[in-house]
Each structure stands twice: as C-alpha cells, then as structure tokens.
Image: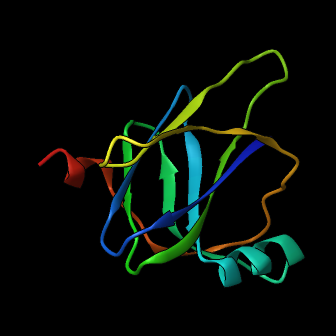
C-alpha cells in the first residue's frame, strides 16, 4: 500500500479534481479528521474509492484541508497522482508513510453521477 499526502486552503463548495494512474481511496479531511486518522482512533472523510478519473470531491466549508490518496500496489508497479483546483492550481503529491485504518465515509462522489 502506498499513500500520498497534500494539504491546502480550500474555499467552501470548491471542487478538487484528482487524477491517479491506478484505482485509489481518496480521503479529504479537516485537521480534526486528519488527527483522528493519524492516531488510529477512526476516520471520517469526504471522498471514497475511485476507479475512474478525474475523481471530483467538493468540500463543504472553507478552511485547511488534508488530502490523502491511498493505492494498493505491488512493489513493481508505479503510480502517479495529480490534484487540480478550479483556479488552475496544481499539486503533485509525494509518497507518505501513512497506513489505512478503519474509516467511515461521510460523502462519496460517484463517478457515474459526475458524468451527467
């Protein structure tokens, strides 16, 4: 398993477009949610498991947001992820030694709904 991390200030109802080379669990969390994730005390997040990209996740309120992307890979496989914001800010995410614990999805964006 490989995890990537990025953080940014995002305004309310702004969408984040995430493109990955392989299926991924995309978790967008406030600082409080992120601390719960790191401590292993449970996880709440916006996002979900995506197999088709770009994945679109919309944040409900303005503030500092943490984006964790987790992919399950064989060690020989390579992957790449890109985060794009509507105002054309782009971030390449770098590997982070995070591990996935149990989680509860607050909101999930269904790729089929995004195609409409």
User: In the figure, residue 45 lies in which quadrant?
Assistant: bottom right
Residue drawn at (57%, 33%), measured in percent from left and top? Answer: 81
Residue drawn at (67%, 72%), measured in percent from left and top? Answer: 103
In this rendering, the count of numbered labels is 0
- Name, please, the residue furthest toward the left: 116
Viewer-side residue, 6 vs 4: 6
User: In the figure, residue 79 lies in which quadrant?
Assistant: top right
* Image spot of residue 32 (x, y percent): 69, 84
Quadrant where the N terminus is found in the figure: top right
* Image spot of residue 40 (x, y percent): 86, 76
| Vertical arrangement, residue 55 with respect to residue 73, above or below | below
* Image spot of residue 89 (x, y percent): 42, 43
- The colour scheme used here is rainbow
Left or right, residue 43 beside residue 1: left
Residue drawn at (54%, 25%), measured in percent from left and top? Answer: 21
Viewer-side residue, 30 vs 107: 30
Left or right, residue 112 beside residue 48: left
Residue drawn at (84%, 54%), measured in percent from left and top? Answer: 98
* Image spot of residue 84 (x, y percent): 42, 42
User: In the figure, residue 37 lies in which quadrant?
Assistant: bottom right
Left or right, residue 81 beside residue 57: right
- Name, please, the residue furthest toward the top: 76
């Amino acid at each position: 398993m490989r995890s990537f991390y990025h953080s940014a200030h995002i305004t309310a109802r702004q969408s984040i477009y995430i493109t990955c080379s392989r299926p991924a669990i995309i978790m967008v969390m406030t600082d409080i949610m992120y601390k719960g994730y790191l401590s292993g005390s449970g996880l709440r997040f916006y996002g979900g498991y995506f197999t088709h990209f770009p994945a679109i996740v919309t944040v409900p309120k303005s503030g500092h947001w943490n984006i964790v992307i987790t992919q399950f890979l064989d060690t020989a496989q390579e992957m790449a992820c890109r985060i794009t914001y509507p105002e054309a800010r782009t971030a390449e995410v770098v590997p982070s030694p995070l591990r996935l614990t149990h989680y509860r999805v607050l909101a999930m964006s269904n790729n089929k709904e995004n195609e409409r």
